[in-house]
Amino acid sequence: MIPCPDSRLAAQIAFIVEIDALKSVLRQTLLTDGSRRENDAEHSWHIATMAFVLAEYADAPVDAGRVARMLLIHDIVEIDAGDTFIHDTKGHEDKDAREQAAAKRLYGILPADQAGEFTALWGEFEARETADARFAHSLDRLQPLLHNFETRGGTWTPNHVTADKVRALLPRIEGGSKRLADYARALIDESVRLGYLPEA
Amino acid sequence: MIPCPDSRLAAQIAFIVEIDALKSVLRQTLLTDGSRRENDAEHSWHIATMAFVLAEYADAPVDAGRVARMLLIHDIVEIDAGDTFIHDTKGHEDKDAREQAAAKRLYGILPADQAGEFTALWGEFEARETADARFAHSLDRLQPLLHNFETRGGTWTPNHVTADKVRALLPRIEGGSKRLADYARALIDESVRLGYLPEA
Ligand SMILES: [Ca+2]
């Protein structure tokens, strides 16, 4: 549809237009003012920006620019696979297969070299082995906690989420940053104290 | 409100929570499916991701990670200053003063070292002198063209925008990339041909 002078740029522009759909993938998280649900594109912007603000708290040295890049592209698979709510056990059963197929189709729109590069970066995020990936997960998990606190239990209350379920997410934050995990733990305790989150 | 173990992390978390408001700053641009207006946060995600996809077309060597970082934070001033429609001459008169005050307040929420760093990066974007800043502007201007093409003149038609007004934006794209400017020029011509954009 869009005129393109060569097939490489055509593929890149097609990818850029295709990923606009990430703005329509809704998460459970509410905006901090409670006005509406957050979408994956703006969530990705938020956590990528957090990478530059909070990099100093990574337990192992990280490349903040690389963490941001990973976070900018990590949710693109959800255009096809959808967002799986963190406390939805059933949805997590076939999540991997759905996301693998999505990665193949979506990153595959890019020229082969970039498709390989983006797929590898997404795979690195999913594998949670490198320092960059571990810290990226810390941020991805910390951000919704901030939103749930600001909205006084915004998505916890309607989904009957209890403190033990939220505390079960702490190891993922701790995998990249003990300091941010300590902060998240304090935030959960404070949420319980304020009545935003039931202990059980 | 949020419990914080020390004042440095407290300031950083306060900034992260504050900038959530960027998700509620609406642009004129429509999503490519025409369903609604785009907000500044998802726009910033889109163009930061474009930096990694299109970096090879920058006329001078750029650091894609740095361009992405610049693009992630460049619109934060619009939380206070609002988005000024590109074809709104009146709104542009006091844009600089409004954005300067906004930068001072918003980046100023961060600890002093990071406030300085973010303000400098935003200033570099605005000054359009470095290769990174020039290429960042190319992407910031190219993206809405793609959206207007995909929505068959989505924001051009209701705002009575003509081709000469859109062509007047080409030098900003050309400042960072002749190749992307050539592409944008072809896109404008094609938009005229298809009746999405009146020649005059
Ligand atoms: Ca802007």
Image (cartoon, coloured by chain):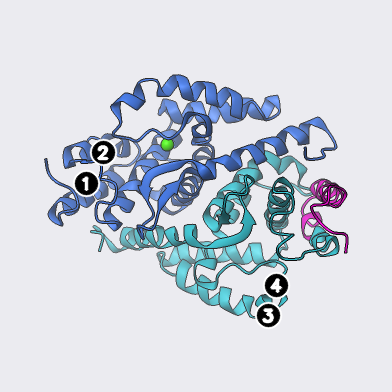
Chain colours: A cyan, B blue
Residues marked 2 and 4, same chain: no
Q: Position of residue B56 (x, y in %)?
A: 40, 49
- Which residue position is annotated with label 4? A88
**Please, which chain is the residue tagged with disc 1 on?**
B
> Depth check: A185 or B127 in front?
A185
**Which is closer to the viewer, label 2 or label 3?**
3
- Tell me the residue at 81%/47% (across/down): A187
* Comparing labels 4 and 1, the label whose residue is closer to the camera: 4
Cβ–Cβ under 8 Å for marks 2 and 4: no
Q: Is residue A74 above or below residue A82?
A: above
Side of B26 relative to B105 (left or right): left
Q: Do the numbered discs 4 and 1 sit on residues whose CB atoms are within 8 Å?
A: no
Q: Which residue is mark 1?
A: B185
Q: Label 2 lies in what chain?
A: B
For residue A93, the mark is: 3
Other-residue count near label 4 (Cα within 10 Å), few / some / many at <14 / 14–19 / ≥20: few
Q: Is residue B92 magenta?
A: no
Magenta extent: A172-200
Mark 2 neighbour density, 10 Å: few (under 14) some (14–19) many (20 or more): many
